[in-house]
Every structure is written in C-alpha cells, then in structure tokens.
Amino acid sequence: MTDASSTQRTLVLVKPDGVRRGLAGEVLRRIEAKGYTLVAVELRRADEALLVEHYAEHAGKPFVGPLVEMMASGPVLAVVAEGHRVVEGFRSLAGATDPTLAVPGTIRGDFGRAWGRPVIENLVHGSDSPESAAREIALWFPGL
C-alpha cells in the first residue's frame, strides 16, 4: 500500500551540456524506468532572470555568475517528475555532483566527466528537498 503523503514532485533539469550531448532522452528513460511519472516536460532557453531566481539561495557566491552563464548557453529540458520519494530517488539516479566521483550506474557516473571549465557541467539538476522542489517547480512551471 502506498502512503499518499510520501508522493512528491521534483524538478529535474537536463542542463545545456546534457542537451547538447543528446542525453535528454536517456535521462527521461531512466526517470520512467524507475517508475516515476512525467507530469510536465518542456525544452526551453532559460533567461538570466529565471536562473538568478532559481539559484537565489547561492546569491553572492563566486560560482553563481559562471553557473548562470553556462545554464543560459543553450536549451534546458525542464521536467516535473512525480512519485513516491521522487526527490531523493532522482538524486540517487543522478549521482554525486562531481561527475568524476559519481559511481557508475548513475547519470553523472555513466555520462559525466570533468571538463576543466569554471563550472562543473554535470548534466542534470534535481531538487534537493520537497520544499526546494515546490519553489523550483513554481518558477519553471508556474501553471502547475
């Protein structure tokens, strides 16, 4: 029996590096293979205002400028996924933030690597808590 209170939504972003490398479909495949439901999917270019708001918790940190620049460099696949404990489930699918340390079998472990650029290009973003997910989904998909 499923506990409805543990059904969650999370925001997943396939970052421009993942889209450029043709990995958006693989990310979606893994989300669905895990048994999560795709609630919304949109390929879009994120403007600076959206990205600054998305990364607001990191405002003033030195990596924010280069991160916003990288995220605005190309299309982003924005996804809302839903399921039992999907926030932590997707983060497990994604793997460690540093792709060099991400274990094989995870998205970053299988497809990521360090490129020696100012910002880690690690293919995907996943909300880190149900509260962050709610805030991020409202930014990227205000109609949900």
Image (cartoon, helix red, strand yellow):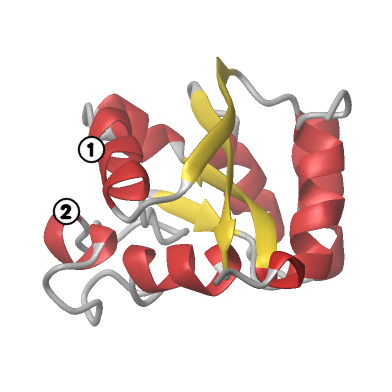
- For the image shown, how many numbered marks are present on the structure? 2
Nearest the eye: 91 or 17: 91
Q: Amino acid at mark 1?
A: Glu
Query: Label 2 belongs to which residue?
Result: 111
First in sequence: mark 1 or mark 2?
A: 1
Residue at point 36% right, 77% down? 96
Query: Label 1 belongs to which residue?
Result: 26
Q: Quarter of the image containing the N terminus?
A: bottom right
Quadrant for residue 61, please give it: bottom right
Residue at point 78% right, 29% down? 141
Question: Does residue 56 sit above or below 75 in this rendering?
Answer: below
Measured in 3D between alpha carbons, the distance from the residue under mark 1 to the one under mark 2, in whole angstroms, is: 10 Å
Nearest the eye: 82 or 5: 5
Residue extending furthest toward the front: 1
Q: Quarter of the image containing the C terminus?
A: top right
Q: Amino acid at mark 2?
A: Phe
* x then y, percent, for residue 125: 52, 54
* x then y, percent, for residue 139: 84, 38
In screen coordinates, is 27 left or right of 85?
A: left
Evaluate if marks 1 and 2 touch, with contact meaning CB atoms under 8 Å apart.
yes
Residue at point 76% right, 33% down? 140
Q: Is residue 74 visible?
A: yes
Question: Does residue 36 sit above or below 56 in this rendering?
Answer: above
* x then y, percent, for residue 99: 27, 69
Q: Which mark is residue 62?
A: none
In screen coordinates, is 118 left or right of 31?
A: right
Nearest the eye: 48 or 88: 88
* x then y, percent, for residue 55: 76, 56
Quadrant for residue 85, please give it: bottom right
